[in-house]
């Protein structure tokens, strides 16, 4: 403190364009940083605090559902049975552990080439329920689905089998009925 | 006077490349005519043929030691695919150990249309069509009208560059480098790969080797293949990304029908191109984890990015392995 007061006294006595003004100006100037050349400021890389980021990163993989005390769960979900059902086919769950049943509207209209717009037929889309992830005898599954759907359908139920792609189509919207059927059979 | 036919020594490579099984059959059935004198390598091969050793039982039917189990859960109705584990350091195969393979990769309903799509994609996505033709503006001959509009008995013509003329421009020809790149969906690529692996496994063309290294002695490799009955097949060897077996590589180096590649280079075209597929034991874990992850992951929201906790093969702390890092 005293040292600073003495040098300040000196500074007040100096003339503006003297020999040592630049040095003194640097000492008391607020814009110039006081850096000593002997002290070097380094840094250390540490990955320890990354754990606070890790907790927030999402998982990429769909987890297996935990084992509940009672099934079905409040949302109505239940797992597939651990023993093989006694059927000539097997329908496995999809990656979200749900039944592989979807309702689609397939557009079966097509425009013939080089015709004016008036002549294009307006065809209603086909309403289908698809079942994928099937192994085994697809025709037996189609027959069983026909019987399962019969009480709920106005007309004779229609099914279609695509063996190359292992898909079964049922005409109409019967997703819940088919899911019940698969659940009852332990798939 | 009976003519004698002397069969001299034939180079081993030519001999092995041909259908040796047919010749062995002739020798065993005694079909070699009596006026044939065998000398050199032919005599050895025909009179002492190497008969391949086949396993005594199917691995499913016997209780052999299971050396490798599947890492991921196997869902109903499938069970693990069991394969004998071979040792390429021994001349004769020993059927001691069994490895379990995941049925989601090796026991799948093979989709032939997906296989075809993947092979077609592999052939064309890298292609660039460099065909380029000149239009009438680029021909660079004269701008002049060749003859006046009327008076001559000929057709009216405006320039000699037109597509009607010989040596003129081409009206609707190919214009410059055209890339044939296109992307296939993950679903089709995966089903193609699993179908190819399944086909090899079902048709007894899949071999699991532990270790996959053969000894550097001369002719060890060929004898080793002959004892397994695969000397006249084209073989694809798959090794670890970091370690490649040096002696096996030397043996295969000058062979047109044998190839070796790391796991990251496994592709459907190569699998189908070669008769047999040999997988080293130490790649089975990585292969299974990576493919099962594809079957069990969430759908990408927009496109793959790197802030996930548990991506196989990527460490979120590594800056070098970030996807899409700019």
Image: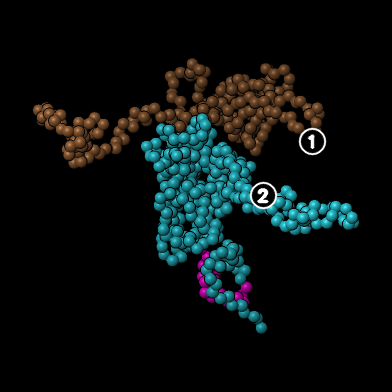
Residue B111 belongs to the span the image colors magenta:
no
Label 2, label 1: how many angstroms apart (C-alpha)? Answer: 28 Å
Q: Tell me, for residue A154, which label it has, or none.
A: none
Nearest to the observer: residue A113 or residue B284: A113
Residue depicted at x 43% and y 49%:
B241
What percent of the width, then of the height, locates residue B260? Answer: 48, 55
Quarter assignment of residue A171: top right
Q: Quadrant of the N terminus of chain B?
A: bottom right
Q: Residue furthest bottom?
A: B1
Residue depicted at x 52% and y 18%:
A76
Nearest to the observer: residue B279 or residue A183: B279
Reply above or below: A36 against B148: above
Query: Is residue B230 something that shows in the picture?
Result: no
What percent of the width, then of the height, locates residue B152? Answer: 88, 57
Residue depicted at x 51% and y 20%:
A77
Q: Chain of mark 1?
A: A
Q: Tell me, for residue A114, which label it has, or none.
A: 1
Disc 2 designates what residue? B175
Q: Residue furthest top?
A: A74
Provide the residue span drawn in magenta: B33-51
Q: Chain of mark 2?
A: B
What hue represents chain A?
brown
Reply above or below: B6 against B294: below
Residue B40 belongs to the span the image colors magenta:
yes
What percent of the width, then of the height, locates residue B90? Answer: 42, 58
């Amino acid at each position: 403190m005293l040292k600073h007061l003495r040098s300040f006294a000196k500074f007040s006595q100096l003339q503006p364009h003297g020999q040592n003004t630049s040095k003194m100006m640097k000492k008391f100037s607020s814009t110039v940083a006081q850096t000593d050349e002997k002290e070097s400021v380094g840094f250390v890389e540490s990955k320890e605090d990354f754990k606070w980021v890790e907790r927030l990163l999402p998982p990429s993989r769909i987890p297996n559902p935990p084992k509940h005390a009672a099934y079905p769960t409040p949302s109505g979900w239940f797992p597939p049975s651990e023993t093989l059902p006694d059927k000539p086919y097997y329908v496995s769950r999809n990656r979200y552990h749900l039944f592989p049943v979807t309702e689609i509207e397939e557009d079966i209209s097509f425009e013939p080439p080089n015709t004016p717009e008036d002549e294009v037929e307006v065809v209603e889309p086909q309403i289908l329920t698809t079942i994928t992830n099937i192994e085994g005898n697809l025709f037996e599954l189609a027959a069983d689905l026909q019987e399962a759907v019969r009480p709920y359908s106005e007309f004779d139920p229609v099914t279609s089998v695509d063996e190359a792609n292992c898909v079964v189509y049922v005409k109409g919207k019967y997703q819940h009925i088919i899911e019940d059927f698969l659940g009852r059979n332990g798939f | 006077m009976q003519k004698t036919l002397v069969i001299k020594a034939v180079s081993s490579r030519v001999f092995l490349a041909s259908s040796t099984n047919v010749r062995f059959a002739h020798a065993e059935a005694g079909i070699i005519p009596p006026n044939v004198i065998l000398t050199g390598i032919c005599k050895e091969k025909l009179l002492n043929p190497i008969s391949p050793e086949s396993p005594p039982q199917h691995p499913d039917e016997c209780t052999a030691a299971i050396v490798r189990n599947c890492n991921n859960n196997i869902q109903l109705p499938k069970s693990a695919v069991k394969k004998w584990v071979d040792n390429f350091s021994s001349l004769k195969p020993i059927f001691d150990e069994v490895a379990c393979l995941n049925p989601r990769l090796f026991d799948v309903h093979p989709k032939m249309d997906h296989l075809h799509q993947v092979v077609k994609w592999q052939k064309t996505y890298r292609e660039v069509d460099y065909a380029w033709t000149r239009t009438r503006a680029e021909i660079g001959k004269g701008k002049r009208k060749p003859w006046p509009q009327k008076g001559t008995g000929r057709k009216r013509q405006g320039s000699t560059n037109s597509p009607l003329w010989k040596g003129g421009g081409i009206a609707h020809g190919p214009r410059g480098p055209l890339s044939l790149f296109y992307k296939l969906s993950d679903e089709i690529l995966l089903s193609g790969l699993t179908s190819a692996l399944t086909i090899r496994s079902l048709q007894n063309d899949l071999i699991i080797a532990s270790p996959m290294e053969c000894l550097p002695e001369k002719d060890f490799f060929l004898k080793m293949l002959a004892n397994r009955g695969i000397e006249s097949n084209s073989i694809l060897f798959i090794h670890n990304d970091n370690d490649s077996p040096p002696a096996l590589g030397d043996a295969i180096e000058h062979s047109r029908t044998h190839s070796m590649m790391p796991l990251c280079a496994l592709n459907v075209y190569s699998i189908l191109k070669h008769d047999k597929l040999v997988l080293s034991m130490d790649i089975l874990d990585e292969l299974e984890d990576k493919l099962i992850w594809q079957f069990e992951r969430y759908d990408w929201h927009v496109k793959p990015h790197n802030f996930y906790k548990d991506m196989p093969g990527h460490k979120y702390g590594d800056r070098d392995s970030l996807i899409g890092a700019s």
